[in-house]
Amino acid sequence: MGYLRDAPDDWLPLRLVDQDGTPLLGAELPPHDTVLAIFRWMVFGRVFDQRMLSLQRQGRIGTIGSIRGQEASAAGLGVAMQGLDWLAGSYRELLTYMVHGVPAETLISLYRGGVPGPFPEGVRALPVQIVIGAQTPQAAGLGLALKLRQERAAVVACCGDGATSEGDFHEGVNFAGAHHLPVVFFVQNNGWAISVPRARQTASATIAQKAFAYGMPAAQVDGNDALAVYEVCREALERARRGDGPSLIEAVTYRLGPHTTSDDPTRYREETEVKAREAEDPLPRLRRYLEHAGIYEEGLQERLEEEARESMGKAVAVAEAVPPVTPEQVFDLTWAAETDGARRERERALRELREVGEL
Amino acid sequence: MKANVVEAVQDALRIALREDPACLVLGEDVGRNGGVFRATDGLQQEFGESRVLDTPLAESSIAGVGLGLAAAGMHPVCEIQFAGFLYITMNQIGSQVARLRLRTGGSLKAQMVIRAPYGGNVRTPDLHSDSFEAIYAHTPGIKVVLPATAYAAKGLLLAAIEDPDPVLFLEPMRIYRGYREEIPDGRYTVPLGQARVAREGVDVTLVAYGAAVGTALEAADALATEGVEAEVVDLQTVAPLDAETVLASVRKTGRAVVIHEAARPGGLGAEVSAVIQEGAFYSLEAPIERVTGWGTPYPFVQAEGLYVPSAARIAAAARRALSA
């Protein structure tokens, strides 16, 4: 505990476990079952990403963003969250959504172009955000509700380095600062906003330091060190739940894959850069730690991969069994209290489709 | 009680805050200052800073925070200081608030109201006098409500706050303090999505909403001196539109004039005209007339009196329809 800073320091990203899996001297690390849970989710995230990519190639889902390389940030954060916490994330946090209780089949449905939900009862999450940064003020609103009702829970507002250029990002962080709300702003700085590098987003030396201007503490963490991410998130979340206000975490990571399946990263970044970052892949790094700590059982990763593939197979089957969205459903979900005029619109649209046999 | 429009709004907010523990009011200057139009005057003193909140000066976040509050089960009433600033909230309202229920498969709803004073002819500074209702009528998922009287302002606002869908509530700035009328004490609601006949007539239908209803009634008075009985339909909710009330009137009169002070191109006049020709074409005796703002941005104070439809322009359009 005690990783958040109230003023800029020399900003070496917080790291608890080295590239070779060795814990840093004096590092306080989470208990083994937590570490194993994070590892399991990271493996799941990797398998999910591969499977979604191949589903897209097969034309079974639409365009999807890759999360490969960012599993440590996503899972470290997700495992640190609790059931009563709210998640306001984007398409880069699909793994965090799943850790937080949104089933894979729900997300697969979304990418199949179907209705993404409903989320299971009690899972507190906003829809997977598409408009960059729009979830930030919404998260402040969730935080305000928690504060007013004196609920012991926190809100996590995720975004990427590109989103920190958006007006909504600043409005949301500022609102949470001004009203002292229980929100943790979690920025995955993966180096690239599609083709625009981090250096072209902001002249700030770090994204973390932006927090100080809004009156909240911050940490910059090695986003490929799953245990450091977990620990700093735990501190920030606990602080928020205690009523001590918002904070901001910059997780420095790297997007190993394309922005989305429609993106060709060779147009804007060198293969040598990606190769170098492959060597910093967070998944083998955590595995090396497990081995170092003596809690890696022979064949564990392969077993988890097999489990993940099996569970993805089931999720795909469930999602593909969901009948296509009907026009009636779209109207049903548009209005909770349909007026006569809205009903007239529904009937007109349906009549027109029936007339030509499209319904 | 006697109340003008702004007092009726304030009374509705007070009742909602008193009776609904999930309701809260937020916006710029709504707290100690009581709002720049005093619509929230005294509310923070009565209900405290946790129910009536001054927000940072950032409209997009006011709407976005509203969404977050609503997603968590609160019933926020957000104030945008002038409708002219609604463009800033376009993503949060049009893409986020209006689609929350759809995009979560019904998991979350946005039971929230966004209030804003709209309209011109009150000599405001530049960019304060716009009427953007058509833009939001074009973003289904949010109801767009414009009261024309103090009675409607209170009843529609209370209905909007308890409606499970988001509501954009545009208050006619021009008649905020126009006159006081007797309205019931305590809670009553005026249903959303229903137009009302503000004056009965048989010769021509004047369709209007918000502050333009008063101008249409003035035009109807003028027409009455010529022996023309105009029926005035006050839409009250422009999205979703109550087509039946409009159609019933036009089927009776055979003539229609649609009035709004928003710009003409793509305005609600076009929508209402289309609804009329789809549903009452064979009753029409004359082309549908539109009396609206121009195909220009809202002009400067010195020209706004000519831009906003006058009773004379409305009466002239009615005469054109009657002589066709």
Image (spheres, coloured by chain):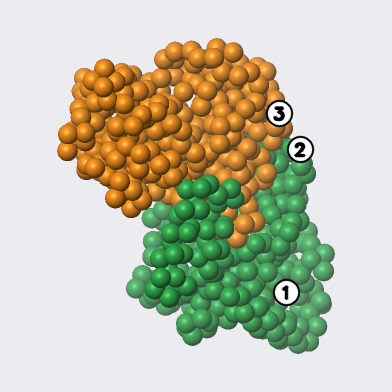
Chain colours: A green, B orange
* Residue B314 vs residue B168, the one in the foreground: B314
Q: CA distance from mark 3 to mark 1?
A: 49 Å
Count up the numbered dots. 3
Q: Nearer the viewer, mark 1 or mark 2?
A: 2
Residue type, numbered disc 3 = Glu
Q: Position of residue A64 (x, y in %)?
A: 49, 71
Q: Position of residue A155 (x, y in %)?
A: 66, 48
- For residue A359, say whether it is visible: yes
Q: Which residue is mark 3?
A: B19
Q: Is residue A73 left or right of residue B128?
A: right
Q: Which mark is residue A40?
A: 1
Marker disc for residue A358:
none
Task: Indicate the amino acid at tag 1.
Answer: Arg
Residue placed at 43% from the left, 31% from the top? B197
Q: In front: mark 2 or mark 3? A: 3
Helix, strand or loop at mark 3:
helix
Q: Secondary structure at mark 2?
A: loop
Chain letter of the residue carrying label 3: B
The residue under label 2 is which amino acid type? Answer: Gln
Dot 1 or dot 2: first in sequence order is 1
